[in-house]
Amino acid sequence: MKAKKLLACVMAMTMAASMAACGSGNEGDKGGKSTSETKETASSAASTSKSGEAEKVQLTVWGPQEDQAPLEGYDEGILKAMCDTFAEEHPEWDITFEYGVCSEGDAKDVVTKDVDAAADVFMYANDQIPVLAKAGAISKLGGTTADAVTKANPESMVASVTYEDGLYGVPFTSNTWFMYYDKSMYTEDEVKSLDAMMAKDLGADVKNFGFALTNSWYIEAFYFGAGCQLFGDGTDASAGCDFDSEAGIEATKYLVELSQSSKFLNEQDGSSIAAMADGKLGAYCSGSWDAAAIKEALGDNFAATKIPSVTINGTEGQMRSFSGSKAIGVNPKCENPEVAVALALYLGSEECQTIRYTTRGIIPTLTALESNADVAADPVALAQMAEISEAAYLQPVLDEMASYWTPAETMGKEIVQGDVTIDNAADKTQTMVEGILSSGLSE
């Protein structure tokens, strides 16, 4: 659905419906507008519209520095250009914008520091939703806005901004990692299986596979490949973590052997890209943020694909990366919630996702853009979309995930250091799982 049609559909509905969607926040009204305040604002907006005069609105918008830096065709950055277009398309509002720099990764810390002073509309990484929601710093979207997001995006992206059955943002890009490879070293069939890749002789001084084993956003791929689960399908905290099952212990043993292989390169501080540039590495797992550097390193031999399968204890399984999204959220304390919600929806629209892709290479989420000629011809976009649809595991949007990162990171570091062995793999894996469940909420 085109962006303008989406907006027309949403704004054609009653103002009260969209207002309730923004003003509700969390149950208990943790600082957001109350239902009565919302209705009063909607009534005021409606009467202003009838008078024929544009309603004066002030909105503060926060986004990453990259969206506000000059780019070709956008002298003042893409964020301002998108907001200006939104204002032009809505003459019923006389909007004054103020902008601030806040990266998606920093949103939960910056926004929750002072919700009253925070932006009306901001961008964030989806795994921050529990913190933002509990702080009353992000609005639960509903009504026609939620319907528009749900219809325009794949189920996985809708799930990424869903928390406790509420929709808390408008996704604008998926967030995951996949595999880059040198196609002079591997064929398209060979990169489907890590076993086939590791079995190949690429030369005495060439590494077959580069991987950030000490990074807890990556190591889970092998446990998922062994058939393990983390909080069930990622939405059930009560299911706990079964990485310490027999299959999980075998995954730990596999990683011990992999780390000791002369064909393996543990990624540290860009070592994998440097090795690729020197023709010393066949494949490396990373995300779209490294695409430009790897394209430069590999030149005509550049290729990308979803991560491979792996055989652990005699059973082949698909390795799975964590996946999520980056999204646009609305502050429950915004003074003009109906305008803020409409802007958030627009910033996640087809028009804006196309701008982000063409200027910054930000891979879109919208189903409608999968058939875009440029996207369909882009190996990075295709690899990321294949990863999301075929090989990714939705990173749990649960409070309990806070206890996952350090134990998983410790496991990776101890494997690389040689502290984890075949003999103590069971005990070390059990220790990791105890740490993951240390919140006491996953029993």
Image (cartoon, grey):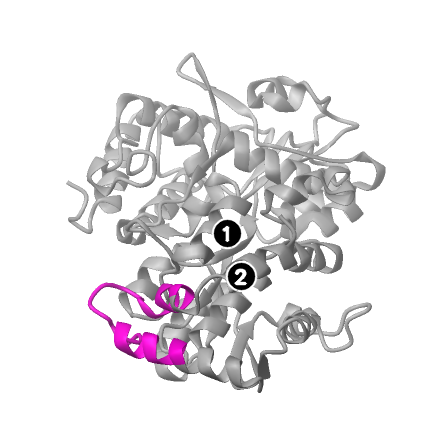
Query: Which residue is label 1 attached to?
Result: 148
Of the image marks 2 and 1, the number of the one nearer the N terminus: 1
Q: Residues within 10 Å of mark 2 (few under 14, many from 20)?
A: many
- Asked if the stretch drawn in magenta spans residue 198, the answer is no
Q: Residues within 10 Å of mark 1 (few under 14, many from 20)?
A: some
Q: Is residue 381 left or right of residue 224?
A: right
**Quadrant hosting residue 6:** bottom right
Residue 114 is at least partly visible in this image: no
| Label 2 SS | helix
- Asked if the stretch drawn in magenta spans residue 20, the answer is yes
Q: Which mark is residue 345?
A: 2
The amino acid pointed to by label 2 is Leu
Q: Which residues are magenta?
A: 17-43
Q: Is residue 227 above or below residue 10?
A: above
Q: What quarter of the picture does the C terminus occupy?
A: top left
| Label 1 SS | helix
Which residue is more in the foreground, 324 or 34?
Answer: 34
Which residue is more in the foreground, 337 or 252?
Answer: 337
**Quadrant hosting residue 65:** bottom right
Which residue is more in the foreground, 397 or 365?
Answer: 365
**Quadrant hosting residue 236:** top left
Which residue is more in the foreground, 198 or 126?
Answer: 126
Q: Is residue 129 above or below residue 278?
A: below
Residue at 63% in and 71% down: 86
